[in-house]
Image: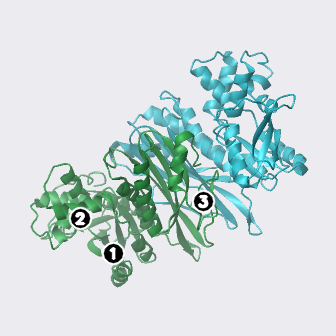
Chain colours: A cyan, B green
């Protein structure tokens, strides 16, 4: 329930809006949601904690955006259309300017995706943001159209959307571990603080992609989840993946002085990308590009699925890379 | 997603079980849930924070029970049948005995209600438990059978299930503010730490009760939500309500030395009761008692709904009580 005692009551005001799709919105003991006939509900829950997922001085507008974005990214990975979400929020104190900015960032992204806030809870406590999001996936002839991690098959292509490593680049710069030109820092920081969930792409890939996941913990770690769930392995063109980092692909910054090893680590295991990694048979390459075009989300082919378990990285010359990356050991 | 890096991975083990009703259980980017045709989904989310909702040294088994119980209580208030829930958990450190006991308490209650854990998130941070629960409500001839706060009408009876004030009694005793006989403390503490959500009663009241809410913040405060949502007022027999406190109704403890004023405060605004407060037309008194019998949940009639706004309390002689109670000012 979104009811709390005393001054925390006012928090609800920042988030209370008239119900649209949901039958009942914020305010009763439960929200009531009526999924369309012939659909399944996709559900995902993420908890963001100060100091671990964001800095204590994080801008509240972008924090509101990101808190919902990481959840929408999970819906995207399933190919689900966003419907609604609940927000549970623990706050050390009632800070109205902070709440106003946080709710604006949150609700702007929610509105952009037609995703309605239908309930939640507010309480006093160390800052903690827990969002549970609901999406709709069609069921066609009794078969769910949800994209799963478990459908990759040997011979499939491996793809990733957008660019990789930008969020990690920003994080390192904000930590003072490297220097970036202001325009590049601004770009990378935008990717870290206001990631774009690939909601349209996920839906466009339904019926075409054989598996999908969102890249939240780094490409290698997340691709590893697909490999394990599908019982397969993969060979990746590491050079193709590292070329996706903003510092390489953006024409304005061809010469940023970050050594290749570091760039490779950012791209392959940087995390916080919220792109989609997915697989598809080689026979549907045109359909994949058409889906990417329709969703206005660039996608790059970066490898192939093998029968042999484990993950192999090839350098530009096609030779195996020896170096291991942060999230690589988990599943090699 | 229930994926976390490093040692937090192992947390997932305590909560991972084979999927039953849900199409997909814990492990993919989203859980997939297929509500039965002709039903609505009822959704509620609650966040429990150490120091505010439970003591730092709270027994993890009972904490696991309570974290789900407060959510099931919201479903009960809507008349929904529990289906599934997600768990997001922030923990300061991985403490395996704590996790084992917490998950046992949580999953024992979940199993008792056929409510399946379908997903969630685990992270490091100050202890925080966020559960989002999903239930099913039938839609009959296009009309939702959900119990709402907004259906109370002048002339309706006001009821409450079970007993009131026990949790507050335990809290005061644990704080050292009053002394209780050991057997009464044990009983009251059980009510505080392992409340019984009135799930069967909520479902039995569908189609009979005109409005319902669960008593989490205290009877007067929560009944106030019904009055506001329904645009009505109420007159309560305060003596009938205070007689519901365990120290009065339990035959073993007829003489507990707590002054009447204090008992009245515990019963009327103590909170943490997780009973149902509800209204129903006087014409269905027999059906209410039949529903209570079927659900094995005693219910007591404690007042009536009036056209005049506000909440009036009458003493045993039928005279208005002057004293105001904690949660009374909010809506008087």
Tell me if residue A250 comes above or below residue A285 in the rendering: above
x and y, in percent, of residue A137 in the image: 69, 58
Q: Quadrant of residue B22?
A: bottom right
x and y, in percent, of residue B78 in the image: 45, 66
Disc 1 and disc 2 on one polypeptide chain: yes
Give the quadrant of the C terminus of chain A. top right
Residue B10 horizontal side relative to residue B225, left or right? right
Q: Nearer the viewer, residue B63 or A15?
A: B63
Marking on residue B25 = 3
Do labels 1 and 3 touch, CB within 8 Å? Answer: no
Question: Which callout, 1 or 2, points at the residue further toward the start of the chain?
Answer: 2
Question: Which callout, 1 or 3, points at the residue further toward the start of the chain?
Answer: 3
Mark 1, residue position? B297
Question: Residue B47: in sight, yes or no?
Answer: no
Q: Nearer the viewer, residue A6 or A324?
A: A324
Q: Residues within 10 Å of mark 1 (few under 14, many from 20)?
A: some
Label 2 marks which chain's residue?
B
Label 3 marks which chain's residue?
B
Marks 1, 2: nearer the viewer:
2
Residue A6 horizontal side relative to residue B170, left or right? right
Disc 2 and disc 3 on one polypeptide chain: yes
Marks 1, 3: nearer the viewer:
3
């Amino acid at each position: 329930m979104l009811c709390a005692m005393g001054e925390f009551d006012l928090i609800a005001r920042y988030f209370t809006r008239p119900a649209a799709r949901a039958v009942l919105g914020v305010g009763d003991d439960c929200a009531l949601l009526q999924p369309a006939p012939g659909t399944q509900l996709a559900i995902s829950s993420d908890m963001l904690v100060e100091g671990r997922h964001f800095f204590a001085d994080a801008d509240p507008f972008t924090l509101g955006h990101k808190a919902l974005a990481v959840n929408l990214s999970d819906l995207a990975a399933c190919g689900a259309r966003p419907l609604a979400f609940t927000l549970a929020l623990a706050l050390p104190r009632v800070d109205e300017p902070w709440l106003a900015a946080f709710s604006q960032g949150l609700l702007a992204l929610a509105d952009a995706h037609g995703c309605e806030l239908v309930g939640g809870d507010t309480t006093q406590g160390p800052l903690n943001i827990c969002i549970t999001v609901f999406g709709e996936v069609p069921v066609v002839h009794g078969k769910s159209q949800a994209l799963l991690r478990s459908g990759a098959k040997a011979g499939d292509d491996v793809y990733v959307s957008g660019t990789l490593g930008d969020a990690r680049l920003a994080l390192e710069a904000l930590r003072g571990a490297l220097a970036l030109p202001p325009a590049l820092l601004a770009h990378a920081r935008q990717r870290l603080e206001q990631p774009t969930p690939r909601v349209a792409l996920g839906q466009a890939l339904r019926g075409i992609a054989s598996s999908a996941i969102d890249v939240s913990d780094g490409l290698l770690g997340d691709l590893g989840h697909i490999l394990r769930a599908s019982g397969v392995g993969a060979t990746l063109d590491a050079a193709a993946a590292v070329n996706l980092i903003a510092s390489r692909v953006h024409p304005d910054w061809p010469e940023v002085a970050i050594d290749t090893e570091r760039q490779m680590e950012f791209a392959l295991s940087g995390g916080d990308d919220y792109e989609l990694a997915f697989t598809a048979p080689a026979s549907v390459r045109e359909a994949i590009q058409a889906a990417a075009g329709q969703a206005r989300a660039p996608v790059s082919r970066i490898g192939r699925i093998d029968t042999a378990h484990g993950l192999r990285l090839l350098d530009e010359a096609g030779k195996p890379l020896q170096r291991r990356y942060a999230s690589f050991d988990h599943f090699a």
